[in-house]
């Protein structure tokens, strides 16, 4: 690991301490509460070099306080789980999906979280880097329908037996 990579990793760790504190604070606020500096950006991770090259997007990924608050408001108790998964989703997504029909220069980065659900990050390419604009869960059935556009050969197939119920998968 180069010095530059070590510095970036340390910066992400420091940002995550602040992000976790913000998630906890946002959970206590009423949804109509205004936040100071909503456009302030925090570093949340980097895309793998292969995905960055394949999509023609910068490697760095940021999140604004406004988007972070949106994730907390929409996902409630699950917000912290999603936020903690962001670095893994960015560096090792199981699928990358073109979302430009819904939003220009938008991609969905998806990572299976067990066999029953996947975590999805909606990321928009901007002139100064990539931005997380939303995050949510999808079930395995929806995950199967998503078409990977990353061009990677290492995208694993979904390994769910057709007779296995979601409740059984969640117990595992």
Image: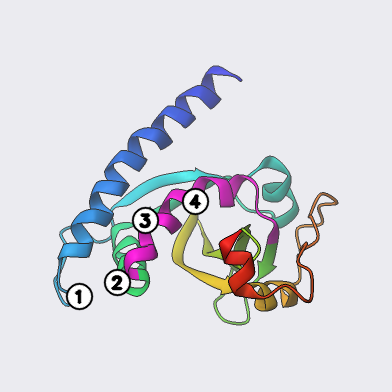
Residue indicated by mark 2 = 73
* Residue 115 position within the rendered picture, expressed as x and y whole percent measured from the top left: 66, 63
Closer to us: 77 or 153: 77
Report, in whole angstroms, how far the alpha carbon at label 3 lies from the one at label 2.
Answer: 11 Å
Q: Relative to 27, is 116 on the left or the right?
A: right
Choose the circle earlier in sequence order: 1 or 3. 1
- Indicate which disc residue 2 carries: none
Q: Do the numbered discs 2 and 1 sit on residues whose CB atoms are within 8 Å?
A: yes
Magenta: main secondary structure = helix
* Residue 38 position within the rendered picture, expressed as x and y whole percent measured from the top left: 24, 61
Residue located at (72% from left, 72% from top): 164
- The image quadrant where one finds the N terminus is top right
Report, in whole angstroms, how far the alpha carbon at label 2 lies from the one at label 1.
Answer: 7 Å
Q: Secondary structure at mark 4?
A: helix
Quadrant of res 71: bottom left
Q: Secondary structure at mark 1?
A: loop
What range is drawn magenta here? 76-95
Residue indicated by mark 3 = 80
For residue 29, above or below residue 54: below
Residue indicated by mark 4 = 85
Q: Residues within 10 Å of mark 4 (few under 14, many from 20)?
A: some
Residue indicated by mark 1 = 31
């Amino acid at each position: 690991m180069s010095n530059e990579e070590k510095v970036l990793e340390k910066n992400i760790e420091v940002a995550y301490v602040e992000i976790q504190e913000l998630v906890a604070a946002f959970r206590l606020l009423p949804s109509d509460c205004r936040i100071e500096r909503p456009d302030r950006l925090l570093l949340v991770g980097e895309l793998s070099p292969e995905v960055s090259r394949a999509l023609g997007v910068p490697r760095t990924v940021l999140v604004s306080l406004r988007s972070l608050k949106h994730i907390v408001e929409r996902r409630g108790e699950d917000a912290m789980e999603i936020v903690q998964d962001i670095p893994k989703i960015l560096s090792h997504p199981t699928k990358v999906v073109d979302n430009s029909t819904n939003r220009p220069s938008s991609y969905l980065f998806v990572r299976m979280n067990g066999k029953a659900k996947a975590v999805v990050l909606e990321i928009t390419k901007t002139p100064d880097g990539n931005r997380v604009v939303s995050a949510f869960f999808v079930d395995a059935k929806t995950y199967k329908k998503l078409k990977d556009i990353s061009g990677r050969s290492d995208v694993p197939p979904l390994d769910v037996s057709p007779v296995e119920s979601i409740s059984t998968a969640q117990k595992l």
